Amino acid sequence: MSEKFVVSLISCVHDVPEWVYEKYKEAGIEFRYHECDTREDLQKYAGDADVLWFMSSRKGLVSKENMDIFKKAGAAVKCGSGTDNIDHDACTKAGIIIAHTPEDPVDPTSDHAIALLFTAVRQTARQDRLIRRGIHDPEEGLPLGKFSGEDLGIIGFGRIGKAITKKLSGFNMNVRAYDPYLDKALVEKFGAQQVDLDELLKKSKYIIVQCPLTKETENLIGEKELKMMRPDSVLVNNARAGIVDEKTMIEALKNGTIKAAACDVLEDHENKELLALENINFTPHLGGWPADEDDTWAAVVDVIVGMSKKQKPKWIANKVAKPRWKWCA
């Protein structure tokens, strides 16, 4: 690492708080922010960066095609838990660690998953739309079910899945969890039953997708899986676009294979067929954003400042990488 530690924020959907600039200045870090859209942008603003920083889920920037630009970078850093917008294989091959802050968004993300489920089941968003159109009819947009004692399936039982279970514990729901990487005893400790995916889909009335997007989970919920689900089921995707096949979900919602859905993430934000459906609700991928934005910024800034002092990040997504920074090995 050279004496000058350079951090380049290459993608962000929010205004950078002034205190972020001040904190980096105090730490002796050269910080620059430019929303990079092209390879030329990356060459200009991130070619000499030690850290490539994301405050968004934009894809295609830190990729195999652009890896030759990042001759100095030792880390790519992403706020929150998901790092699927960063090319893991390319970074690992180049010795660039992928750091993230998975502990940071647990509360807001689990809150949001529950909010999406409640909105879909109680039909509150649809009722609001009806009233705004002048339709004040209690018979329209009736609730789809109750919560107490119902069957809930959670796909992905990490920090957020566990938090969802804990927060819904007062409803005495029958919680089934699918997570092939967890021990059965650990799942049961949190009040859930460990099952395979087929059993979860067949028996759960409410299903929350909360797993990361990986090669294994891409299109995890497709035509076959949707047909397994109960006709009264409600599907919530609070994780990543690409885990649920949107084309088959549209058909399932149209033909009654499933009752309703709610999504915080979409592959195609302009799909008119999807947006026209009344039995699905949307939010714009803000599930992990807290009420106090500074909390999210602070978690990532602390990690980056620590790296400038040769402190190894607590959470590294590509642990198999042989770090370019020898002190991080």
Image (cartoon, grey):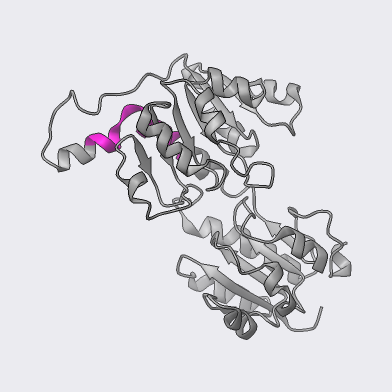
Residue 304 percent location from the top left of the image = 68, 67
The N terminus appears in which quarter of the rendering? Answer: bottom right
* Residue at image location 50% in from the left, 41% down from the top: 238
- 207 relative to 86 in the view: left or right: left
Residue 233 visible in this rendered orientation of the protein: yes
Q: Quadrant of the C terminus?
A: bottom right
As drawn, is 273 to the left or to the right of 1?
left
Residue 253 place in picture, x, y as percent = 39, 33
Q: Nearer the viewer, residue 217 or 33?
A: 217
In which image quadrant can residue 7 be found?
bottom right
Question: Which residue is the extreme one toward the top?
Answer: 149
Task: Give the extent of the magenta segment.
Answer: 112-127
Horizontal side, residue 269 vs residue 243: left or right = left
Which residue is drawn at the image coordinates 59% and 65% (left, top)? Answer: 54
Q: Is residue 207 above or below residue 293?
A: above
Image: 208 above or below 71: above
Residue that protrudes farthest toward the bottom in the picture: 44
Q: Residue at x 56, y 76 (%)?
A: 22
- In this rendered view, identify the residue nearer to me: 288 or 60: 60
Residue at 52% of width from left, 38% of height from top? 110
Point out residue 318 in the picture as x, y percentages from the top left corner.
77, 55
| Secondary structure that dominates the magenta span | helix
Q: Taking 66 as reference, is 87 above or below it? A: above
Residue 78 in percent (x, y) is at: 63, 60
Compared with residue 3, is residue 74 higher up or lower down, i.e. above or below? above
Q: Is residue 65 magenta?
A: no
**Residue 142 figure quarter:** top left
Instruction: Name the foreground residue: 199 vs 44.
Output: 199
